[in-house]
Image (spheres, grey):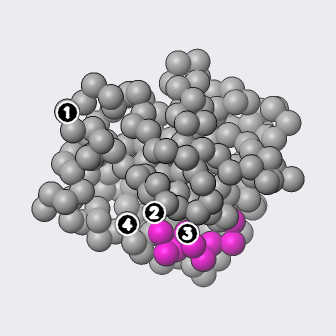
Amino acid sequence: MARVALMTVGLLLESVDHPLMQDFVDASEPIFAAANVNSGFIERSLWPEPDSSPDWGEALVPKVFQGELNAENRNAPILSLWKDLEAAYAFAYSGLHAKALRHRREWFMPHDFPGYVLWWVDDNHIPRWSEADRRYEILCQKGASPNAFDFKHPYNAHGQLVQLDREMVQQYMEQPNSKS
């Protein structure tokens, strides 16, 4: 059975240790804790955790940020695995994560590139950061495809355009841990 890989990207206005980023830092741990108990969540690797298990590989700064001053200290990507598209969507747009999204202009540089990329992986496959970077480049350069897509243009594991199952999304959103 396939799983959904999701990499989110963003360039913080300041480094995470800057006082202006304290609200972002304070919001992060409760959001991660909510993900950890979400029934649709499988696993995640935070950048830059080289010793995380399983081996997600060496973290990379996405090419869209490589020309930015101090991008490495302001890069805030997350690579995660989800049971299905609906679980990832429900978590992203409900609960604590949805509340945090409302503050993204206070924390992140404005941009005209995608804020995330999704793709399907085999059940026993752990995506690596280098793979996520390649998928993100595909989405940035060519738009949504079965190899790299977003929630507006989702594909199923067979490479066909689909619509999210709104009933499944609602079921995930109604879970107690997603209401925080």
List x then y, in percent, for residue 127.
Answer: 64, 46
Total labels drawn: 4
Binning the other alpha carbons within 10 Å of mark 4 as few (below 14), some (14 to 19) or many (20 upward) gives some
Q: How far separated are the C-alphas under marks 3 and 2? A: 9 Å
Residue situated furthest front in the rendering: 51
Q: Earlier in the sequence, mark 1 or mark 4?
A: 4
Magenta segment range? Answer: 32-40
Q: Residue at x 62, y 72 (%)?
A: 38
Binning the other alpha carbons within 10 Å of mark 3 as few (below 14), some (14 to 19) or many (20 upward) gives many
> Which of the pair 49/156 is nearer the observer?
49
**Pointer 1 residue:** 69
Q: Residue at x 49, y 75 (%)?
A: 33
Q: Residue at x 41, y 27 (%)?
A: 63
Q: How far separated are the C-alphas under marks 1 and 3? A: 31 Å
Q: Is residue 77 visible?
A: yes
Q: How far separated are the C-alphas under marks 4 and 2? A: 9 Å
Looking at the image, do the residues carrying marks 3 and 2 touch, with CB atoms under 8 Å apart? yes
Q: Is residue 65 left or right of residue 140?
A: left
**Pointer 2 residue:** 97
Binning the other alpha carbons within 10 Å of mark 2 as few (below 14), some (14 to 19) or many (20 upward) gives many
Q: Looking at the rendering, which quadrant does residue 134 occupy?
A: top right
Q: Indicate which label's residue lies in the foreground, 1 or 4.
A: 1
Q: Is residue 31 left or right of residue 76?
A: right
* Residue 35 - label: 3
Q: Is residue 86 visible?
A: no
Q: Indicate which label's residue lies in the foreground, 1 or 3.
A: 1
Position of 32 relative to 146 (above/below): below
